Image: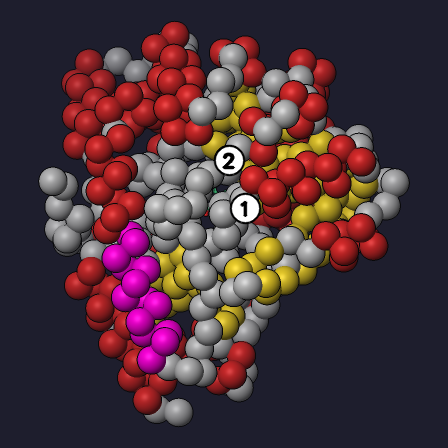
Amino acid sequence: MFNFDEIVDRTKTPCEKWNKYKGTDVIPAWVADMDFKSPPCVIEALQKRVNEGVFGYTDIDDETYDAIIAFLKRHYYWEIKKEWLVFTHGVVSSMNIACLANEGESVMTTTPIYPHFIKAPKHANKEVLAIRMKEENNRWVLDFQAMEKAIKPTCKLFMLCNPYNPAGTVFSKAELEQLGAFCLKHDLTICSDEIHADLLLNPEAKHIPIASLSESLAQKSITLMAPSKTFNIAGLQASFAIIPNADLRKSFKKTMGSMVGGINLLGITALKAAYLEGDAWLSELRLYLAENLKMVQAFVAHNTKLKLLDQEATFLAWIDASALHVESPYEFFLQYGVGLSDGEPFGDKNFVRLNFGTQKSVLEAILNRMQKAMNSL
Ligand SMILES: Cc1ncc(COP(=O)(O)O)c(C=O)c1O
């Protein structure tokens, strides 16, 4: 049993999440990391490595490759090859590399979405074809009709977020097959950000890497994964791209050049320990987060002016606050001492995103404050 209820005073370190509201009575519930300590196996591996005392240039050893390969096989029945792996220090960097490396003039993605899906193509001077997700059967899903209508021959890349940040959708096999067919039909490479893959909260849902569906999709895909969200090690900056096609991999690596270095040695140490020994911790984390999600769902159900669709993954709840009819729902809840993510940079200012990856007592305090805000209306 791991103790996810243990309060960790993160104000002692300059962590982004708590630093933003330092010195004020605001409980932060925004940026996507959790308030839990990483698994003991990760902390112990890091302590052991630090005790060695020398931190020079470091290779990635075979054990690390094997740990990733085994983790993906164990969790997703996906068999990858060592040479498909390209390490980077972050998924956002990889998204930018994928956009820069792509030969098309425009990039298709969806909205509302984690802002870097829009920023990365823009940085690469590409036009962004952002297709609004739609509500169907109480889930946020892809709008294939709108995608068909908007696609252009100049577009050669689709940027997918699965599981979906901010709405927590886990795309089903049928949905991924339909998307895969769309991308193959229009000759689009798929850059699939699967950083939240390990954080499924609905036991019925199953994460399927789109690249694992068929050889033709594998050959058109760049899958981005990392242990950072899962094991709460975002500050260690360790991630990897899985690129089965040799030409795609070559152009990705060429674009990285020597500008984007690999992951640092403590990141590698943490990644290896988490993938080798972190499964038990991860199973308990998922249960804990699923209970937290129930608390958020109960709060929303109690407040009919708020809306939350079914959510299958992530510790981020995408709450529709449009019925409040306030100028900025983010500012509204901030006045009551809760620092949510503003929906605006995600593409809809009538929403807020609540990070419930925290101790139950903290989440309770957040929801109590939000209730006070609702009662004031
Ligand atoms: C979908 C998604 N991709 C990427 C990232 C950031 O990844 P990294 O810290 O590895 O750049 C986040 C963080 O919130 C995310 O939610």
- Residue 15 visible (yes or no): no
Name the quadrant of the N terminus.
top left
Name the quadrant of the C terminus.
bottom left
Is residue 324 found inside the magenta-colored segment of the image?
Answer: no
Which image quarter: residue 311? Answer: bottom left
Q: What residue is shown at x 83% (from left), y 54% (from top)?
A: 149
Evaluate if marks 1 and 2 touch, with contact meaning CB atoms under 8 Å apart.
yes
Looking at the magenta stretch, what is its main secondary structure?
helix
Picture coordinates of residue 122 (x, y %)?
Answer: 71, 47
Picture coordinates of residue 297 (x, y %)?
Answer: 35, 68
* Residue 171: image tag: 1
User: In the rendered view, does 96 fall on the left or right side of 371?
Assistant: right
Picture coordinates of residue 317 (x, y %)?
Answer: 41, 61
* Residue 358: image tag: none
- First to last magenta residue range: 289-302
Establish if 172 lies above or below 74.
Answer: below
Helix, strand or loop for disc 1? loop
Seen from the viewer's position, the closer of residues 272 and 162 is: 162
Q: What residue is shown at x 50% (from left), y 72% (from top)?
A: 320
